[in-house]
Amino acid sequence: MADEEKKGDQKQEDRQIIGKASATERDPNSSEKFSFWLAAEEIVNPFDIVEAEQMGKTRTFGLVTNVKQITDAPSHLSNYISSDFGSTEAAPQTPRQGANVAEVNVLANFDPSGEYPMGIYMPVQSDAAVRFSDEEGIHVALGIDKMPEKNRIPAGLIRMSNGTRARVYLDSRYVLGPEGAHVNIAGISGLATKTSYAMFLIQSILQTVGAKDIAVILLNVKQNDLLVIDKPRKGMKPEEHDIWDELGVNPQPFENVRYLLPWGKDTQTTGLPNCFGEPPDQFQTYAYALEDVVGNRVNPGPGLGLLIRVPDPWDTLGALIGEIQHGVSNQEPKWKSVTTWNNLLNGPPLMDKGVPQSVGEVRASSVGRFVRILRRVVRNRQSGVFVEQRAARRAVNLGEEIRKIQGGQTTVVDIAKLTDEERALVFGHIIQEVYGMYAEATIDERGDLPKRVIIFVDELNKYAPGRRGESESSILEYVLDIAARGRSLGVVLLSAEQFMSEVHGQVVGNCATKVIGRSDSSELADAAYRFISQDLKAHLTRLDKGELLLSHPIYRQPVKIEFPRPAFQSIGHD
């Protein structure tokens, strides 16, 4: 211990002092914050991590949040006057004394000797020497040094003003459970930043935690971004390769990938799915006949409720859907003839010669409203995924395929060309099936069920909206349940959206790890971002492409990271 302490002292002495702590009457240092003045010519930027000497041999680590210049000028007017009353050519008559001062939020206090077992929470004393932290110090500052090696998931690189680079790790216990779970990515960062980071993080998890016990389900929502993840990217630059190597992750495409693509209006004749660009070499096509949605006694479907996304304050439509679901799935006498979408929309018991009929206690006017809404979804505006009869040899039942997930396998479900209602149906169907497998099924039902499943979905705000009434989501109940119980169930939600403020507060609150890309100031003013200090929010509006702010339970402050570009082919739509 003494040798390590001596070695640490030597490493600290080798690093240049960049300034000294400063406490004033009006701006005192505290156990949470401190300031330091910078030596001449030294450059420090927000998000740099520094360390200050503390009592004895202890050190205090902190995150720079802002840098200001302070002079002895009492006002801007005095500066104006000293420059010959505003002459831009004149030299100031009174040279000003000034200094650059950095403001720092405390990350951690480190006692290498163990002299203070209760910890040091004293403010950094004025005139204490301040240095840039090295990688080892950054790990101490973030708590990574106490993270077991087996739990470390590479999450990106910190790059500081002095050129120091440090690997950043997430604790798998707070990503995959049981301590916490879920990752949410927000921001308007640019082409494919959110999706690219999600894919990097999943690849990092599979390579470090182990793929054999983890199944991955990806929803492709834009173009064909995720329909080529099994194909290596050509022409990777050496510097990109170096970042992968530095993080200890192999730059490789996804392995054991299964593609599920939607049936389209022309699929019957062309055999091609409804997707952007060329379909993958190997794929399956999924479609929805009436029975696939309503279900039967053996295989319950996702339900018609996922297709009806309109306000229903008196639950009138909900009651009618319940009648239909029960009648069709159990083949009750008056519903026996209802086997296709056409039967349901145009025949009894809902319709008779084009006139809506009352069903149970639901009046004919409400039945007519339901038929109009459903016809618009499955007939007038549909993309082709709804079919009268689904031929099992040509199109699969999506729910049955989701129940086949295996550890080490990645399943990509394409919804890029589907309407909003169809996307809601597919995502809701996936969530219901996964929830049923992990929360409701017994071990005897499937002994080879992967220990964990990661579900990636973009545009989460459409399925778990933050403001009720704007976009009713019947999937919300399942998303809330998975967000709350996922860490114990083994179901991990990796989600993305442009605006975190538009996502339900309980979903965001249950995401242990939050990643923020470039965002505008009006969005950052929302309460969803209260975990970020005001100074850091100002810098979030200026993040470059490929830069993200990472918040994790073991870090006391969010940190800025960089990450490598995907190792698979990608178009880059985000």
Image (cartoon, rainbow, N blue to C red):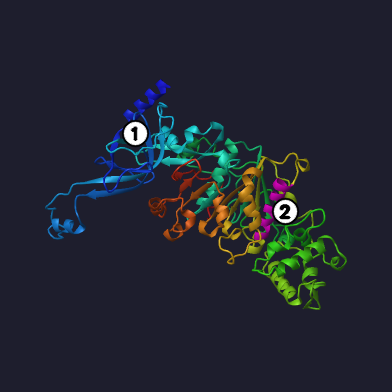
Q: What separation in Å lies between label 2 and label 1 (alpha carbons)?
A: 60 Å
Amino acid type, mark 2: Leu
Foreground residue among 249 and 421: 421
Answer with the quarter of the image where residue 213 lies. Answer: top right
Prevailing secondary structure of the magenta residues: helix
Foreground residue among 328 and 113: 113
Q: Where residue 503 sits in the image (x, y, percent)? A: 55, 57
Q: Are marks 2 and 1 in contact (CB under 8 Å)?
A: no
Q: Where residue 464 sits in the image (x, y, percent)? A: 60, 58
- Circle 1 Cα neighbour tier, 10 Å, few/some/many (<14 / 14–19 / ≥20): many
Q: Which mark is residue 524?
A: none
- Residue at the right extreme of this rendering: 333
Mark 1 lies on a secondary structure that is loop
Position of 537 with respect to 185 (left or right) is: left
Query: Is 93 in the magenta?
Result: no
Answer with the quarter of the image where residue 16 lies. Answer: top left
Tell me the quadrant of the picture where the N terminus can be found: top left
Residue that carries the numbered disc 1 in the rendered image: 54
Of mark 2 and mark 1, the one earlier in the sequence is 1
Q: Which mark is in front, 2 or 1?
A: 1
Residue that carries the numbered disc 2 in the rendered image: 398
Amino acid type, mark 1: Gln
Mark 2 lies on a secondary structure that is helix
Q: Which residues are magenta?
A: 424-440
Whether residue 390 is situated above or below residue 434 in the rendered picture: below
Q: Where residue 418 sits in the image (x, y, percent)? A: 64, 61
Foreground residue among 66 and 319: 319
Position of 453 with respect to 351 (left or right) is: left
